[in-house]
Image (cartoon, coloured by chain):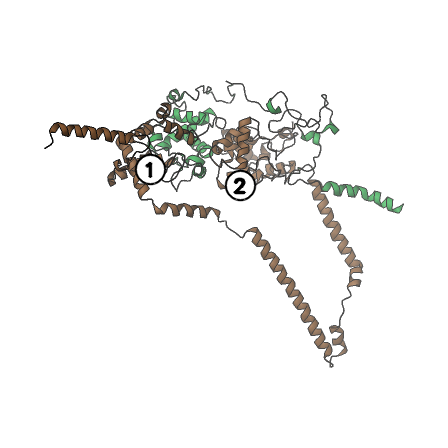
Chain colours: A brown, B green
């Protein structure tokens, strides 16, 4: 019979041994300590999304922060409690693991969470459950979504060329075959003796090409077509002097409006901040690029150029595409904010342009045309109430920009 | 003799044909008509021509530089734009005073009340601005970028944009939201250069509404 005292001693020794075993620097076999009760797992799942853990952490892979699977093997529970509640404090305390973790994750701070120990246990329970029973459906959903984005409607341009070329080949073949048939038929008819003279003449008819080409009618027609086409091209060309329509210079960084404005639907104004408050729509500075590219596509060589610009402070020298002559005044806010004109009206389908091209001619005729045909945007603008009244009293047509001085010389030239 | 006379007669036409070929396209801006009227004499904010020789052939500038030279050598990188003096108050600030709280003043910033009154017009403007500056990362309903169904296209690539109605973000004050737009928070960068103070308060009003959804 062991005495009561001995029993107490034994228990004390066991406790101490256990404490040392579980608080050692390498192994934290607390996996078993994590609750596996379904109710607690469900609670953890709920907390995981309501506290938005899922925005930065996934169980099986790294997102913004590290993958959580196995955290209960790497750290002890008290460390996890402390880190979740106030990660900055743990890092500041000089804890080696925390400092390394912070550095490994781009010095991204985890915010403080006012969670109770029991709630953190529940989250751990959910993490363990996810680790042991990974959801199969999630993987297929991700690949499905990726596949969906690549498909595009319509026939691609390269297939179109192939189709057209094969059609032309078929047509030429048909021509050759028809020529051969004519030859065979002529030969067959000539071999027949009972043809009359008239029929023979028709069968053996020779087209005198030389005479046809030398005829004044033909020469006159060809000369007319050549001169007319040439003159049209020259006149069109002369009209484009000083007009930069179609100018699509190569930029120092291969920025694609198709990706940013088209695929990701970022509003034009997010980067071109001046459009509703100023004369110029503005070309964004590097800090605006960095709002997203601090994280997105970090390894791309083109994005590295952005980082270089940010590091050196040297602005990126974008090549100006739209350059209105200095003799004319144009104000973006007046057109976008007051007039309510879409960017695409003057800049074309910018969200489909890989390289920006000048879409509009930016000539005076082009401006005037628009001012003549565009109705004035007078909605909810008290300034125009009386003007519209006066206009309607004297005219049956709607009030256009030209009726508000849109054709006055000094509006744009001063 | 006859040939040369014919050639002379054809010269103007030939010149016209050559001129007609000066069309813009690709890297070539095409021929400029009356370049002296096209190029700005004052400094142009979004144009910078650093070549001092550009347009020497028609220059009548007093400093002897090329006609098209348009850069300000007194500025860094000879830029024509420069940052306003620190503490500058915008003329169009609409009565609002500059926000002087710094990055480290979050605790004070969170207590700053929204100076704008509650009105449907201001809320609607906040929504419009939210859809310009915020929704591609935070989602049209402020739902963040976690769920598969989220329409935050950029947020999904950026990864880890929390929902406004999550426990962590739900209770944040409008002062905190304003601070976040101004100085950035966590991985979000500062949007102060894009959104004026007044607009930031308008957005804060709308975000407050999204937090409760």
- Mark 1 falls on what kind of element? loop
Q: Is residue B125 visible?
A: yes
Residue at far front of view: A1
Q: Quadrant of residue A62?
A: top left
Q: Residues within 10 Å of mark 1 (few under 14, many from 20)?
A: some
Please, is residue A179 above or below residue B51 in the view?
Answer: below
- What residue sits right under mark 1 in the picture? A70
Residue at far bottom of view: A194
The quarter of the picture where the C terminus of chain A appears is: top right
Mark sitting on residue A275: none
Q: Residue at x 81, y 44 (%)?
A: B10
- Mark 2 falls on what kind of element? helix
Nearest to viewer (mark 2 / mark 1): 1
* CB contact under 8 Å: marks 2 and 1: no
Q: Nearer the viewer, residue B57 or A221?
A: B57
The quarter of the picture where the N terminus of chain A appears is: top left
Q: Which is more N-terminal, label 1 or label 2?
A: 1
Residue B87 rendering spot, x and y as whole percentages: 50, 18
Which subunit holds the residue at mark 2? A
Residue A327 rendering spot, x and y as whole percentages: 66, 29
Please indicate whether residue A376 sits to the left or right of residue A75 in the image.
right
Which subunit holds the residue at mark 1? A
Residue A70 rendering spot, x and y as whole percentages: 33, 37
Please indicate whether residue A220 sits to the left or right of residue A259 in the image.
right
Q: Nearer the viewer, residue B43 or A240?
A: B43
- What residue sits right under mark 2 in the picture? A258
Q: Residue at x 32, y 41 (%)?
A: A131
Q: Residues within 10 Å of mark 2 (few under 14, many from 20)?
A: some
């Amino acid at each position: 019979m062991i005495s009561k005292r001995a029993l107490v001693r034994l228990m004390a020794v066991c406790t101490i041994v256990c404490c040392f075993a579980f608080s050692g620097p390498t192994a934290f076999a607390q996996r078993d300590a994590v609750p596996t009760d379904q109710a607690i797992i469900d609670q953890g799942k709920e907390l995981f999304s309501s506290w938005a853990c899922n925005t930065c952490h996934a169980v099986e892979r790294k997102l913004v922060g590290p993958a959580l699977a196995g955290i209960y093997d790497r750290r002890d529970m008290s460390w996890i409690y402390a880190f979740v509640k106030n990660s900055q404090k743990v890092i500041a305390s000089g804890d080696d693991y925390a400092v390394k973790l912070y550095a490994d994750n781009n010095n991204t701070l985890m915010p403080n969470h006012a969670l109770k120990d029991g709630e953190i246990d529940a989250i751990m329970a959910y993490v363990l459950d996810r680790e042991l029973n990974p959801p199969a459906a999630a993987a297929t959903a991700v690949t499905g979504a990726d596949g969906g984005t690549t498909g595009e409607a319509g026939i691609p341009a390269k297939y179109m060329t192939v189709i057209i070329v094969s059609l032309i080949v078929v047509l030429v073949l048909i021509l050759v075959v028809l020529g051969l048939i004519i030859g065979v038929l002529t030969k067959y008819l000539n071999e027949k003796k009972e043809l009359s003279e008239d029929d023979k003449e028709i069968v053996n008819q020779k087209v005198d090409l030389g005479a046809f080409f030398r005829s004044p009618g033909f020469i006159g027609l060809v000369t007319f077509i050549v001169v007319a086409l040439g003159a049209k091209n020259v006149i069109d060309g002369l009209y484009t002097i000083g007009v930069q329509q179609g100018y699509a210079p190569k930029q120092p960084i291969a920025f694609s409006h198709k990706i940013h404005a088209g695929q990701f639907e970022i509003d034009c104004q997010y980067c071109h901040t001046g459009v509703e408050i100023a004369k110029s729509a503005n070309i964004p500075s590097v800090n605006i690029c960095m709002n997203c590219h601090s994280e997105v596509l970090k390894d791309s060589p083109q994005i590295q150029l952005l980082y270089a610009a940010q590091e050196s402070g040297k602005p990126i020298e974008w090549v100006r595409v739209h350059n209105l002559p200095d003799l004319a005044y144009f104000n973006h806010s007046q057109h976008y904010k007051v007039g309510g004109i879409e960017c695409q009206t003057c800049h074309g389908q910018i969200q489909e342009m890989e390289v920006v091209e000048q879409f509009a001619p930016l000539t005076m005729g082009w401006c005037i045309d628009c001012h003549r045909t565009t109705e004035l945007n007078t909605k909810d603008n008290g300034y125009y109430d009386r003007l519209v009244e006066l206009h309607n009293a004297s005219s049956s047509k709607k009030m256009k920009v030209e009726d508000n001085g849109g054709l006055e010389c000094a509006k744009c030239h001063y | 003799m006859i040939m040369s006379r014919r050639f002379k007669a054809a010269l103007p036409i030939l010149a016209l044909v050559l001129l007609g070929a000066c069309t813009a396209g690709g890297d070539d801006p095409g021929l400029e008509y009356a370049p002296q009227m096209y190029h700005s004499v004052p400094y142009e904010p979004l144009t910078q021509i650093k070549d001092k020789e550009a347009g020497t052939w028609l220059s009548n500038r007093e400093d002897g530089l090329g006609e098209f030279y348009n850069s300000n050598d007194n500025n860094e990188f000879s830029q024509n734009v420069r940052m306003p003096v620190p503490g500058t108050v915008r003329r169009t600030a609409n009565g609002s005073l500059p926000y002087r709280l710094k990055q480290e003043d979050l605790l004070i910033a969170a207590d700053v009340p929204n100076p704008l009154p509650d009105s449907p017009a201001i809320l609607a403007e906040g929504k419009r601005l939210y859809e310009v500056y915020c929704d591609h990362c935070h989602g049209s309903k402020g739902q963040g970028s976690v769920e598969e169904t989220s329409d935050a296209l950029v947020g999904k690539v950026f990864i880890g944009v929390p929902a406004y109605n999550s426990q962590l973000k739900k209770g944040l004050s409008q002062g905190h939201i304003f601070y976040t737009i101004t100085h950035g928070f966590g991985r979000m960068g500062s949007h102060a250069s894009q959104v004026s103070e007044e607009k930031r308060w308008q957005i804060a009003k709308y975000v407050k509404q999204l937090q409760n959804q």
